[in-house]
Amino acid sequence: MSAKPAAEAVDPVKEERAGKVREVGSQAIWSLSSCKPGFGVDQLRDDCMETYWQSDGQLPHLVNIQFRRKTTVSDICIFTDYKLDESYTPSRISIRAGTNFNDLQEVEVMDLSEPTGWVTVPVKDIHDRPIRTFMIQIAVISNHQNGRDTHMRQIKIHSPAEHRGAAGLEGSGQFTSLEFRQYSCIR
């Protein structure tokens, strides 16, 4: 795929609260190609913008996200802060998807120009639909100012929210407010 300009910044938490997407990263096993002690997966997933993953080694730097079952992924949200991290900030990333490490295929490449805040990377198949995959890999290809190591402050993996009505039919009896949405499915 060809490189595209950075996507517009979106607040992924707002999208989750609005019921448009679900964060499915908690259903996956996360691993990194490298990290400095105390700057690993826990910091990448702690919902705190002050902490970050810091790689420790040669490019490309990899974030591996493996799901236990085939999962629909619509976009990946990455929080970076060029103002704080400068040469540690990714300037080019590649998103790869597949069944395992051996069959990953590149599905998106994105150039980032001094990003500060959330950047959303849509992940679509050739029919412009969210992909279904067992594994996502985020590869940092290059950093700003030819930096060696990378800082990523947060990553969220989104799946489209499933809107099912009373009888499991699309569009029937959809609840729109947060108070009513809690009754939208029978447990």
Image: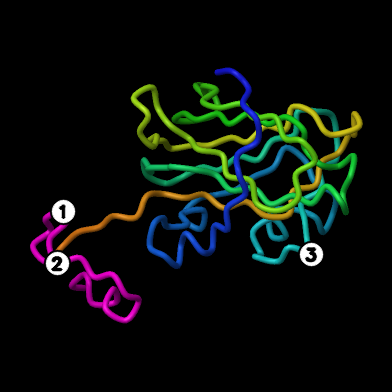
Amino acid type, label 3: Glu
Residue designated by label 2: 173
Asked whether, in this view, residue 77 is left or right of residue 74, the answer is: right
Label 1, residues with CA under 10 Å away: few <14, some 14-19, many ≥20: few
- Which contiguous range is marked in magenta? 166-187
Residue 104: percent from left, percent from top: 52, 24
Residue 127 placement: quadrant:
top left
Label 3, residues with CA under 10 Å away: few <14, some 14-19, many ≥20: few
Distance CA(mark 1)–CA(mark 3): 40 Å
Residue 17 placement: quadrant:
bottom left
Whichever of callouts 3 and 2 sits on the residue coming sooner in the sequence is: 3
Q: How is the image coloured?
A: rainbow
- Asked if marks 2 and 1 touch (Cβ < 8 Å), the reply is no
Residue designated by label 3: 50
Tell me if residue 25 is in the magenta stretch.
no
Distance CA(mark 2)–CA(mark 1): 9 Å
Whichever of callouts 1 and 3 sits on the residue coming sooner in the sequence is: 3
